[in-house]
Amino acid sequence: HHRAMAARPSEQAPFSLQNFLQNLQDTIESLAGSKGETRFYPYLPKNPKDPCTMAYKAYVAAGGHSAYASTPYSRVRSLYIICGSRLNAPSQQAAEELALKSCQATRNSYKVTTGGGCEIAASK
């Protein structure tokens, strides 16, 4: 009788873990291919090999919480676009923070001012 009592919790653990993993899988599948919450449509250079175009495409394809940050495009002031992204972070908020840091670090390394600071263009 004692043995049956001890076995119960471990019998339930794989079941709830399976549910958790299934829910995680559903979430991942629902985010892959999604543009997420778009705050402004990022300007993407036409060249498919451009780092920002590649970063944005990777962001859309990512299955986990991800974010894409970019300097806003202004024809008058922007010679180029600086961007940053973070894919498959633990949460949407974490992805946004890390994408902004990535963009700001890139912007600082150029030591020039473009048409504006880094902003989150899209996140999910």
Image (spheres, grey):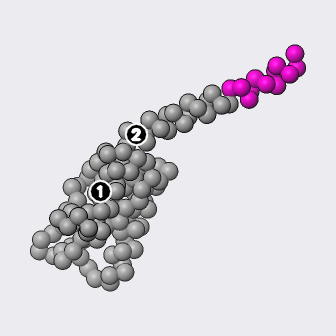
Q: Residue furthest top?
A: 1
For badge 1, the amino acid type reads Lys
- In the image, which residues are magenta? 1-12
Disc 1 + disc 2, Cβ < 8 Å: no
Numbered badge on residue 72:
none
Q: Quadrant of the N terminus?
A: top right
Distance between the Cα atoms at labels 1 and 2?
16 Å
Q: Quadrant of residue 84?
A: bottom left
Q: Which residue does the image show at 37% across and 71% down from the upper left? A: 104
Q: Is residue 6 left or right of residue 123?
A: right
Question: Element at badge 2?
Answer: helix
Q: Which residue does the image show at 82% across and 19% down from the upper left? A: 4
Task: Give the main secondary structure of the magenta stretch.
Answer: helix
Q: Is residue 94 left or right of residue 68?
A: right
Disc 2: which residue = 29
Q: Position of residue 95 (x, y in %)?
A: 43, 56
Q: Quadrant of residue 112?
A: bottom left
Question: Element at badge 1?
Answer: helix
Task: Specify which label sits upstream in the sequence, 1 or 2.
Answer: 2
Disc 1: which residue = 57
